[in-house]
Image: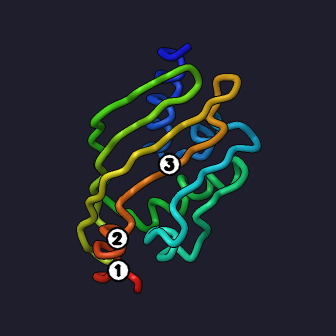
Amino acid sequence: MSQQSRTVVENAWKAFASHDSDRISAVFTEDAEWLAPPGNATAVALEGPSHLVGRKAIVRFLAEDFPRFFVRDVTVTFHGFYADGERVVVEETMTATLANGSHYANDYCFVFELRDGLIHRVREYMDTARGHRMIFGAVPQ
């Protein structure tokens, strides 16, 4: 099960990178959730929620909103994939060029929970202060 779960998540990253709605949609359950830290810089900049509920909301973010904000040179460097049953933890660093031309680099940890071979829940962790400095030049008080 662990190797199958890891493969599901590895393939999901390829779908995310494609920004193709159909490919992204195919890896999530209908009732999937994506939870990021409240007030994270990406959600603030896009004026969107930090808790995405439902496949459609997640697909819209990954296929439309994400590439509107992280406009080019998006690179993900994986530092580890750890699978236990239907749970997969991914450590990574993402770099990109933002819509305003600024460089972005931040470290992330994602916890994927699978159900019936699809992603049911994603919990995203990042250095939120660094994200705010990269995007806005300052950390909110």
Disc 2/disc 3 C-alpha distance (Å): 27 Å
In the figure, 1 relative to 54: above or below? above
Task: Identify the image quadrant of residue 82.
Answer: top left
Task: Identify the image quadrant of residue 92.
Answer: top left
Q: Nearer the viewer, residue 65 or 42?
A: 42
- The residue located at (76%, 44%) in the rendering is 31
Q: Residue 72: which numbered mark, if any?
A: none
- The residue located at (35%, 68%) in the rendering is 131
Q: Residue 139: which numbered mark, if any?
A: 1
SS label for mark 3: loop
- Quarter of the image containing the N terminus? top right
Q: Nearer the viewer, residue 73 or 133?
A: 133
Disc 2/disc 1 C-alpha distance (Å): 6 Å
Furthest residue toward right: 31
Disc 1/disc 3 C-alpha distance (Å): 29 Å
| Mark closest to the chain's N terminus, 2 or 1 | 2
In the figure, 94 relative to 98: above or below? above
Question: Can you give x and y, in whole percent of width and height, for residue 6 in the image?
Answer: 47, 23
Which residue is the site of mark 3?
Answer: 19
Which residue is the site of mark 2?
Answer: 129
Q: Horizontal placement of 106 versus 50: left or right?
A: left
- Quarter of the image containing the C terminus? bottom left
SS label for mark 1: loop
- The residue located at (70%, 52%) in the rendering is 56
Q: Callout 2 environment at 10 Å: few (<14), some (14 to 19), or many (20+)?
A: few
Question: Can you give x and y, in whole percent of width and height, for residue 79 in the image?
Answer: 27, 36
- Amino acid type of the residue tagged 1 in the rendering: Val
- Amino acid type of the residue tagged 2 in the rendering: Ala
- Amino acid type of the residue tagged 3 in the rendering: His
